[in-house]
Amino acid sequence: MSFISVFDVLGPNMIGPSSSHTAGAAVIAYLAHKMIAPPLKKADFTLYGSFAKTYHGHGTDRALLGGIMGFSTDDTRIRDSFSIAAERGLSYSFTPCETETDVHPNTVDIRMENAAGQVMTIRGESLGGGKCRIARINGVEVDFTGEYSTVIVVQQDKPGVVAHITRVLSDKGVNIAFMRLFREAKGHTAYTIVESDGRFPEGIEEPLRHNPNVRDVMIIEP
């Protein structure tokens, strides 16, 4: 028998009418904004399934835009996402796609570009109850929810990198809940995603970068 928490029954604290179409969308975009260095210059959203059909009426557009600017699900600024984005000089677009149907019903692709010219793409799926799953990073299939403290190491798929990551985390006393490696193909770009049930120590990014095959390190705290 599976356990259902009171939070699953009551749903999240949120601005908007739908835990799937507003809260879940905001969480996806919030996680995405944690993966790119600020300030953000542009965000383009491609919506699939029911997101594509109801994004305007259910406030999915406002929630996505709020999340990409760092607003949590209960932040009242989500109501004014459009005007706040204009004030910040953030360019954005929403494109419904109804031709690609082999996706989760509440799916969004987010293409982000920051002021330094870095471009990043994220695919997220809203699972209901304000929960979500990040399913792709830069076209590579991944799987994490953001419910745990998460470190994402972008690396060249070479021997010894994963051992380096686990050694650093062990030296820093990190208790690993989940650890998985996702990659394009053998020897190409890979993502090691580590989830912990405690916060990561301050400054842990620096020792993780001390490997010639580590390209980037991202920390996402819930």
Image: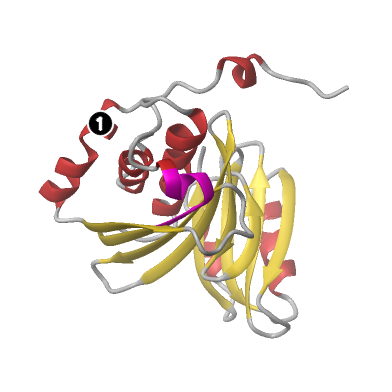
Q: How far across and how far down the image is residue 19, in percent?
A: 50, 29
The stretch of residues the image draws in magenta is 46-53
Q: Considering the numbered disc 1 on the image, is that residue within a helix, a strand or a loop?
A: helix
Residue drawn 17% across and 42% down? 84
Relative side of 169 to 3, left or right: left
Query: Does the magenta segment cover residue 50?
Result: yes
Q: Could one spot residue 36 in this view of the protein? A: yes
- The outermost residue toward the bottom is 187
Q: Residue 178: horizontal and vertical position, in percent?
A: 74, 48
Is 153 placed above or below 96 here? below
Percent position of residue 145, x then y: 61, 44
Residue that numbered label 1 is attached to:
79
Quadrant assignment, res 37: bottom left
Closer to us: 47 or 43: 47
Give whichever of 138, 35 is nearer the camera.
Answer: 138
Q: Is residue 82 above or below residue 118?
A: above
How would you rate the neighbour count of disc 1 (Cα within 10 Å): few for under 14, some for 14-19, many for 20 or more? some
Where is residue 174 shown, x and y percent of the image? Answer: 67, 46
User: Does the magenta run of residues contain 75?
Assistant: no
120 vs 181, nearest the viewer: 120
Circle 1: residue type: Arg
Of 7 and 48, nearer the camera is 48
